[in-house]
Image: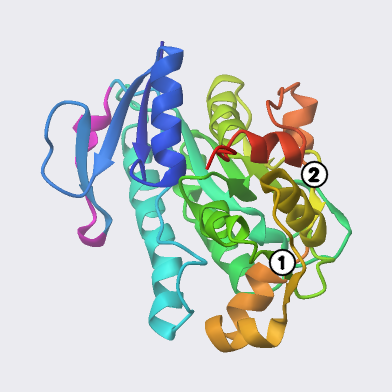
Amino acid sequence: MKTIAIAGASGTIGKALEKFLIQKGDSVKRLVRRDEIDDSEIFWDPDSNNLDPKRLIGIDAIVNLGGVGIGDKRWSQKRVEQILSSRTRGTKLISKTLSDLKSENGPNTLINASAIGYYGSSGSAHLTEETGLGEGFLADVCSKWEESAQEAEKAGIRVAYARTGIVLSASGGLLKKLLPLFKLGLGGQIGSGKQIMSWISIRDEVSAISWLIEKELEGAVNLVSPEPASNLEFTKTLGALLGRPTILKVPSSALNLLYGRQLVEEIMLSSQFVVPKKLLDSNFSFSDPSLEEALLSQIDLKN
């Protein structure tokens, strides 16, 4: 049994990860930005650089998932700054704290969230952990996000960067937003529909994070399914499972008006064929390798 601390435990991935780890037999402590309710919580405040190192003694690993949503709001200048700072500030604080605790029985492992946005939009080219940094705002965010953990790395802490794709969960993210539309028969492809979506089911996401803790993997690790799909394939599969038509098409021009060109190009129209090479090489077993399996695990066909 390990003791794992989670930053960002209130998010979709954080909640699912906490549940998974507890069911697995691990002990979980949540980093919170309010007064602690009990010993299962650890107060921290990245904005004021506040994290008591003593509260981390005896913890085996920290999973840092903190950061404001990327695709839920139009990218104003303020939102762009929040997307970056909410990730780098917390990561730097955790990294420094772990570095200071290196010789005092503190955590020796940091699993730090990142994203496949690191690679930029690359068409159908296969992207592995060895692929270099791409172009665009999200690539820059991911690069600086990962750089923020360097102090922990330099201190000898094992750091793994979980470069996560589109997480499919009915509780949050893309799928939660799409399900009501598709159930009404209002779902459809975005733009040309040719863009490649590198996705992962929520249960494979949390299982993979636990795998990173257990298997001593380090550096960048792609957390995606081995079977990416085009936006058109995704649309048709979800519509078929729900028994609803998907004849509508959402033009990029309309999306640009709603969300702004930069967000649309970097999230909705971005094409990334990402390969989970390190997971596969380490013999990780996917519960939902296919898109149909992943969607079926999340949708209620009775409603």
Image quadrant assignment for residue 119: bottom right
Count of numbered tags? 2
Q: Position of residue 97 (x, y in %)?
A: 32, 42
Question: Residue visible at 28% across and 35% down?
Answer: 30
Q: Position of residue 26 (x, y in %)?
A: 39, 16
User: Which numbered circle lies on residue 188?
Assistant: 1
**Is residue 237 depicted above or below 27 in this figure?**
below
Q: In the image, is 142 to the left or to the right of 187?
A: left
Q: Is residue 170 visible?
A: yes
Q: Nearer the viewer, residue 102 or 52?
A: 52
Question: Residue visible at 20% across and 60% down?
Answer: 48
Task: Classify 10 Å Cα crowding around label 2: few (below 14), some (14-19), many (20 and above).
Answer: many
- Of mark 1 and mark 2, the one earlier in the sequence is 1
Q: Is residue 220 visible?
A: no
Question: Residue visible at 88% across and 60% down?
Answer: 124
Q: Nearer the viewer, residue 254 or 128?
A: 254
Question: Residue 49: within the magenta?
Answer: yes
Q: Nearer the viewer, residue 193 or 180?
A: 180
Indicate the secondary structure of the residue bearing disc 1.
strand
Q: Position of residue 249 (x, y in %)?
A: 74, 74
Q: CA distance from mark 1 to mark 2?
A: 26 Å
**Is residue 195 depicted above or below 197 in this figure?**
below
What's the colour scheme?
rainbow
Three-letter residue code for mark 1: Gly
> Mark 2 = which residue?
275
Three-letter residue code for mark 2: Val
Q: Which residues are magenta?
A: 47-57
Question: Residue visible at 40% across and 61% down?
Answer: 68
**Is residue 205 depicted above or below 248 in this figure?**
above
Indicate the secondary structure of the residue bearing disc 2.
loop
